[in-house]
Amino acid sequence: MINILIIEDDENIAKMITAALSMVDYKGTCRYDGRSGAEEAMKGGYDLILLDIMLPEMNGFEVMEAIKGCGTPVIFLTAMQEVSDKVKGLRLGAEDYIVKPFEALELLARIDVVLRRSNKTQDTITYGDITVNIDRHEITLKGQHVQLTPKEFDVIVYFLQHQNIAVSREQLLSSVWGFEFGGESRTVDIHVQQVRRKLGLKDCLITIPKLGYRLESRDSL
Amino acid sequence: MKLWQKIFLSSLFLIIAAVNIISVTILNNSHRLLLEREQTHAISEHEFFEASFSNAVVYAKLADEKIALTPNDIRRIASDVVEGSGRTRDSAVFDSEGTLIAVNGMDDVLSRITQSGFIEKIDSSGDNYSASVYETGGAHKLAVGSAITTEGMSYRVVTAVDISEIYAMKKKQTDFVRKVSVISAGAISLVLLVTVLLMLNPLSRLNVYTKAIAGGNYRIRIRERGSLEFRELAQNMNIMAEAVQTNAARLEKIAEDRQTFIANLSHEMKTPLTSILGFADILRIKRQVSDSERAEYAGVIVEETKRLRSLSGKLMGIVAMNGTEMEKKPVSLQAMINETKTALVPLLAKNDVQLECLSQDITISADEELFKSLLYNIIENAVKASPKGESVVLNAAMYQGDAVITITDHGIGMTPEVMKKAFEPFFMADKSRSRKAGGAGLGLALCQKIASLHSAKIEIDSHPNEGTTVFITIPREECL
């Protein structure tokens, strides 16, 4: 299970992040000031640290200096808009930053990218008869190899990683096609239909009116 | 053209012109005096010649024993007299028709005299002498003419003397003056140049200095020396630089404060927004939300929204105060305290704190709503700082002519560091505690603003774990 350390002085934000992480079955541990956060990070055992910048006792940059040695990837949370702060954070070795306020799914998407980069995510995901090997870019249905286009593959992986969560077309577009892709939501619909047809997910990958799609988890069926 | 060039050239021109005019005048004057002296001399010589001519006529009459002489006799006599005067004097005699009857010397001057009509101009009465200077072949001659009547005939007598020497002297002196003035002009111009440059030197120093100030270096000061005008100018420029420096520092401070204010405001707004957006998003996209989860998430959203509401309310208060006119009128302090106390009842009950008010009957000039909000904020702080069962004491009394309101609690108090920052916008001594209580860190900043609008002063005396006393001093001018 992925274990994430949250260093954030606002209790409600920490609570919200923990709740968001629990949606994808990640465990969140909270610390409310820089000093105890840094101490906790040095103990190790975390896959990722979410670090606020404006913290009592030690600020986020100081914490980042202090925990440089432990090698855990860091994403920092900032309410500041100045580019210089972002640059400073990244220069100190942070993997990414996220600007407050943010949506839960955006946070999860950033976390996934960083975890994948540091090989913390599972290589294979099993969903009923379907087995996906992300590293080898392979997907099998009942042991049979299934031919998917690269984008179709990314779409099914995204759904498998966000089971039971309603995903909007815009979120899929930005996660799979990238933020700069100016495509329409029709593109998403066509790919989702292809995935449904090829993998026989008609009942599991459901359309939610006005919102998007949701892949029901196997155990909830 | 530069100022030093203008001053230098105009002074030089004036000096040279003055020197030249004076020397030319002196030269001309001395030349004129010499000429007059020569003329007097020439006239007396002429008189002598005239006398010899008259005498010769008389002698001829006596010698020949004639009663009257013929014009031919006169001509002969004239020739004798003219020749008798010898080489020393040029002379000529004309008859009444202007015909030359005798001449000695004269040379070229004679034709000049006849051509210029000098003969005709001679006064025929014989009382006056005519004198004129003629130049021929580089020599100057002074001609004197007069009329003589003898034997019933009028004759013109002209004598001439050489005065070339005077003219030669004048030329020599003119050359000398010219040489001297060229040399002295050179010397004067050198001295003048140095003087002008020295005198205007402070100007170039001032120039360098003003350039430095314009370039943004407000700290430098110029040395105040040189002539009186420059000293004054330097002094005034230093005063100006001082003012610019103070103003620039003040504006920098304002800009910095504003920057901090906006950064803090942005942080204070984004923190609740992050929780609200996050939880709302989770509620929206999560498939199954348990009742307890829903209650918790929605509870946070409500709590954080209230925080935003309080923040925007306080903020609007501060903004509104900057824009709107205050409505100052005489109000009773006691009445305002009582109304504030009524408004505070729910908070007092919730925190289980007593509020004791002791007030003299004081009337002040104030905006009632603003002043009540000032009292409310300060008492609210005191109540929030107090432990359960304690009491907050408000005392309003006249002290040395000013109205003083003290609000004392026996709560957690503040350290000196906290006290120093207490009035800064968004400063919170204990962030998590004040946020839970719905604070935005703007209360005291707002109070400070209201107080300054009433020319009142807020002071804090506080000791950790002993309590805090806030003094609001309203100056006598605002008391009625």
Image (tube, coloured by chain):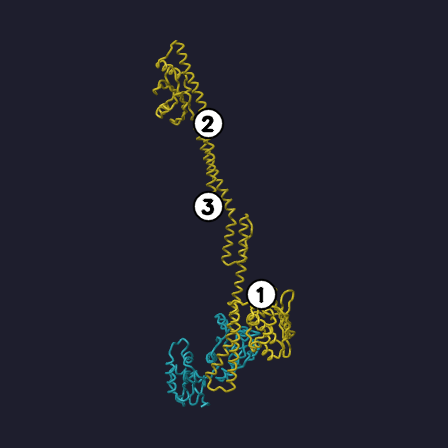
Chain colours: A cyan, B yellow
Residue position for label 2: B34
Percent across and percent down for residue B138 are 39, 27
Residue at image location 54% in from the left, 60% down from the top: B246
Query: What's the residue type where badge 1 is placed?
Result: Ser
Q: Earlier in the sequence, mark 3 or mark 1?
A: 3
Query: Which residue is farthest top?
Result: B65
Label 1: few (<14), some or many (≥20) within 10 Å? few
Q: Earlier in the sequence, mark 2 or mark 1?
A: 2
**Number of numbered labels in the structure image:** 3
Q: Are marks 3 and 1 on the same chain?
A: yes
Position of the C terminus of chain B, as image quadrant, is bottom right
Residue B1 visible in the displayed image: yes
Measure the alpha-carbon separation of dots 2 and 1: 94 Å
- Mark 2 — on which chain does it sit? B
Residue position for label 1: B455
- Mark 3 — on which chain does it sit? B
Q: Earlier in the sequence, mark 2 or mark 3?
A: 3
Residue position for label 3: B6
Query: What's the residue type where badge 3 is placed?
Result: Lys
Determine which quarter of the picture holds residue B124: top left
Percent across and percent down for residue A65 are 54, 73
Question: Depth check: A147 or B241 in front?
Answer: B241
Label 2: few (<14), some or many (≥20) within 10 Å? some
Residue B15 sits above or below residue B446 on the image:
above
Residue B108 visible in the displayed image: no
Question: Depth check: B136 or A130 in front?
Answer: B136
Q: Are marks 2 and 3 in contact (CB under 8 Å)?
A: no
